[in-house]
Image (tube, helix red, strand yellow):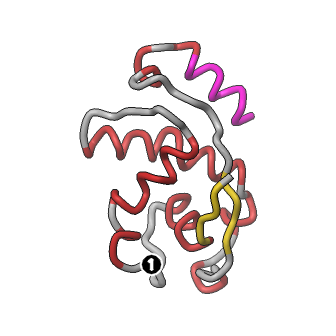
């Protein structure tokens, strides 16, 4: 279990940078530890691959795990509040791209 500030999780869910984030938190580098925590072992080819992982896996997963943050407005998000994030679904490298069973498992977990 790892703690992340609410603003970072909200930003990942909404594809929008929360105004309280700064520096690396606003970049791909800032989100990489979160992606690795949710999907240990996952690899992606490039920046576009990272964006695909965010869109297809991270956002739906975080929306499922933190439905309260889906509904929160930007003004009500508290940067000083942290949320616990556990591993969600490991991926052996590019398994998320190559293995249909991995995607089916993800879909089942997101229901």
Q: Nearer the viewer, residue 58 or 24?
A: 24
Q: Residue at x 65, y 38 (%)?
A: 88
- The image quadrant that residue 23 belongs to is bottom left
From this viewpoint, which residue is outermost toward the left? Answer: 46
Image coordinates for residue 77, horizontal then vertical, percent: 63, 79
The correct choice, above or below, for 71 with respect to 36 in the image is below
Which secondary structure is most common in the magenta stretch?
Answer: helix
Image coordinates for residue 94, horizontal then vertical, percent: 39, 23
Q: Classify 10 Å Cα crowding around label 1: few (below 14), some (14-19), many (20 and above).
A: some
Q: Number of numbered discs present?
A: 1
Image coordinates for residue 42, horizontal then vertical, percent: 44, 33
Q: Which residue is mark 1?
A: 21
Q: Residue at x 45, y 61 (%)?
A: 15
- The kind of secondary structure element at disc 1 is loop
**Image-based side of 32 in relation to 65, left or right:** left
Q: Residue at x 61, y 32 (%)?
A: 89
- Magenta stretch contains residue 2: no
- The image quadrant that residue 21 belongs to is bottom left
Q: Residue at x 63, y 82 (%)?
A: 80
Image: magenta residue range: 102-111
**Image-based side of 21 in relation to 68, left or right:** left
**Image-based side of 67 in relation to 60, left or right:** right
Task: Identify the image quadrant of the C terminus.
Answer: top right
**Image-based side of 12 in relation to 77, left or right:** left
The correct choice, above or below, for 110 with respect to 51 in the image is above
């Amino acid at each position: 279990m790892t703690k992340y500030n609410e603003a970072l999780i909200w930003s990942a869910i909404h594809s929008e940078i929360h105004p309280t984030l700064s520096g690396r938190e606003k970049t791909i580098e800032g989100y990489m530890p979160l992606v690795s925590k949710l999907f240990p072992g996952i690899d992606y080819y490039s920046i576009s691959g990272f964006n695909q992982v965010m869109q297809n896996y991270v956002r739906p997963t975080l929306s499922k795990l933190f439905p309260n943050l889906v509904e929160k407005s930007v003004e009500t998000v508290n940067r000083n509040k942290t949320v616990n994030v556990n591993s969600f679904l490991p991926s052996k490298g590019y398994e998320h791209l190559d293995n249909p069973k991995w995607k089916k498992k993800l879909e089942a977990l997101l229901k």
